[in-house]
Amino acid sequence: MVPNAKKWFITCMAALAGAIVLMVFVFWIFDPYFHFHKPFSFVSYRLYDERYINDGISRHFDYDTIITGTSMAQNFKTSEADVLFGVKSVKETFSGAGYRELSENLDRALRRNKDLKTVIWTMDANSILRDKDYTEYDGYPTYLYDDNPWNDVSYVFNKNVWYHGVLNNLLMTITGQPSTTFDDYSSWEKETGYEYVMAGYDRWEEKAPDAPPLSAKDTEMVIGNIQQNFVDLVNRYPDTTFYIFYTPYSICWWDFMNQEGMINWYLDAELITTKMLLACPNVKLYNFHDKYDIITDLDNYRDKEHYAAHVNSMILEWMAAGEGLVTEENYMERHEQEKRYYLDYDYEGIFRE
């Protein structure tokens, strides 16, 4: 019995080893987060789960331009950017991200891809007055971000990755479904207009007194935030051009800031940010807060911040044409105009029948 038992044990171990090797091979082929290699032409891929897949896109895709940012960048179409800017772009967005997360992702991409020469990047107004290390997320898949092969077991033997990634891509490939395009990746289509904006808008009934000017501590926070997450990064990569733009939130966001008494506070922080970015020669800074026809028309928005896809398309067109470009010569005039408009705006008129 002993020889048979030994043979049975060896056979089982060999079968188990063979199954594991086959499993790893299948996983390597379909590699849903592009951690090991670039996409194969014969495999269909579903692009999803931004915080898992974006680093793989940075590592292995063929591109010279990245479109990045928060949910305010999700509806950009790389096909439009490619035509307007004459580039080959990918989109890497992070819903709800703070500046640090976006900056660190770009730093990894820029270190790995020496051909990356253009970055199109959102500057979300609601993140300027935050700590430089602000984040809303825990539990990042750091095993995908580093170059340590030993912790890749957390990826290869992850049942969720198998179920939602490998098997899904296998099914798409077998049934002939096309891969997700970067135009569609992370994009959304939702109803827009006054009723949808108001459904999610909790307005203060009484206007708060105007906040005092930025304190020394507030100013230090803004400077530290922009220095760490923008200035230090763009200065490390002087051969890359960074198109950075202030996201044009709706008039209801400005109303919210007005009701909180925070407009001057925000505008002071924005001015500090503008001055710091203008000191970087490889930054093209754009401000679209003067697109009043867009900002005051709630048909363009699904809530007080998020604009619809056609606004993303216009933003690309504006930047490609140099419209809204902030310079050393015009930034103070633009700032004063912006300040006068939003301090004097008839916010109560938004809510009149």
Image (spheres, rainbow, N blue to C red):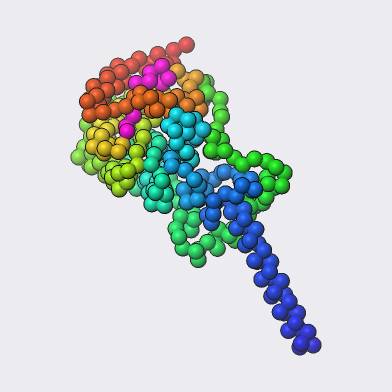
Residue found at the very far left of the displayed protein: 216
Residue at image position (25%, 31%) is 271
Q: Is residue 165 found left or right of 176 in the rendered image?
A: left
Verify whether residue 292 appears in magenta.
Answer: yes
Q: Residue furthest top?
A: 353
Residue 273, position in %: x, y? 27, 35
Q: Nearer the viewer, residue 96 or 228?
A: 228
Q: Residue at x 48, y 58 (%)?
A: 143
Q: Residue at x 42, y 52 (%)?
A: 112
Whether residue 167 is visible, yes or no, is: yes
Relative to 70, is 323 above or below?
Answer: above
Image quarter of the N terminus: bottom right
Residue 239, percent across and down? 32, 43
List x then y, in percent, for residue 330: 24, 24
Which segment did they paint magenta?
284-296
In this picture, residue 301 sits left or right of residue 288: right
